[in-house]
Amino acid sequence: MSGFLLLEDGSVFRGRSVGAHEVVCGEAVFTTAMTGYQEIVTDPSYAEQLVCFTAPMVGNYGVSPSRSESSAIHARAVLMRRATGSDWARWLRAQGVVALEEIDTRALVLRLRESGAMRGAAVAGSASVDEVLELIRSQAPMEGRALAAAVSTRAPYDVGRGAASVGLVDYGCKRSILARLVTAGARVTVYPHHTDADTLLAAGHDGILLSNGPGDPAALGSEVDVVRDLLGRVPLLGICLGHQLLARAAGYKTYKLRFGHRGANHPVLDVRANRVLVTSQNHGFAVDGDGSEVAHVSLYDGTVEGVELPGEHARSVQFHPEAGPGPHDARFLIESWVEEVRLAEAA
């Protein structure tokens, strides 16, 4: 079955459908990760996005339940040059996900790099380009969208039995973050995104982790207010969206990147250690700031990749230290934070 991707600027990229027969809208973005395709599409941070893989072949090593980062596929569509192996395409179809192969992904990525991430529609089957373009332009842009509520847990739950007590506020948390916390020796209580500061503080956790998630941090005003109430009262660690919320709570602003950082090979400078970390990233917004509180910087474009607020016992990173998927350079950041809060409580 034929299909195509249509962007809001009228660009058409034709391909062949290997997934569900549907028309879906979202923000067209690309990832340069060479592996981890299953982890990527099940990452809640990709909610409401049409994900283009720059790798020429996707699906080479099949699928496995152990590799999913959540219980569902959150990407609205998957765009590929070539889908390889029957398991991958069959799994996408079974999950009701639009998937197109034979897309000219190089031309698509060049368009997104030049013009920026934009609204689009993935079409499996035939449809009027004019009608689909009208549908695309009726959709809200990613700026201003609060998406955490759609991917957060509905009720608290517990994971792990370690010595350190960690509360995790779920804005769209990946399973690999929970796995790294448990491996580091934490017992974790996961809370819905709208949990208030009094509830979190009353639980007596050694530290609070602010998770990753989708959407615009500027649209999450009540969540930022909660983080502001937590600052200085309990140790905090923010990851990805959690980093942006912590930074906004501390007085920084955030802004939309032209085409975002998505991939598993992004070099980041640890300013204090003068060490380069190769990191996994997935974000379309960034923190606007400089000065002594900036602890990590992207070596691609100089954007803020981490902040430290020692007076408030808070720190955050824009990249994904749990590396699901990606290199393990930054994994120590979760382990060291868990050990730090455990020892602080014991003292």
Image (spheres, rainbow, N blue to C red):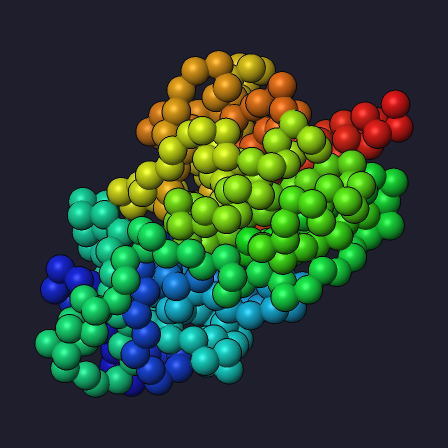
- The count of marks equals 0
Residue 64, can we see it?
no
In the image, taking residue 179 as reference, residue 307 lies left or right, namely left
Q: Quadrant of residue 302?
A: top left
> In the image shown, does 347 or 259 lie closer to the viewer?
347
- Looking at the rendering, which quadrant does residue 104 occupy? bottom left
Residue lying at 26% horizontally and 67% vertically, measured from the top left: 139
Q: Nearer the viewer, residue 124 or 247?
A: 247
Which residue is drawn at the image coordinates 75% and 60% (left, top)?
A: 157
Looking at the picture, how far across and down is residue 54, in whole percent? 35, 53
Residue at 68 percent across and 36 percent down: it is 334
Q: Residue at x 45, y 47 (%)?
A: 221
Q: Position of residue 337 (x, y in %)?
A: 71, 31
**Who is closer to the viewer here, 217 or 49?**
217
- Vertical order, 217 against 26 (above or below): above
Give x and y (percent) for residue 324. 58, 49
Q: In what quadrant of the picture does the N terminus appear?
A: bottom left
Q: Residue furthest front?
A: 198
- Residue 241 appears in the picture as rendered: yes
Which quadrant would the C terminus be assigned to in this image? top right
Q: Is residue 101 left or right of residue 202?
A: left
User: Which percent across, then down, holds residue 108?
Assistant: 23, 56
Instruction: Give the answer, above or below, for where 325 lies relative to 327.
Output: below
Judge left or right: residue 47 versus residue 161.
Answer: left
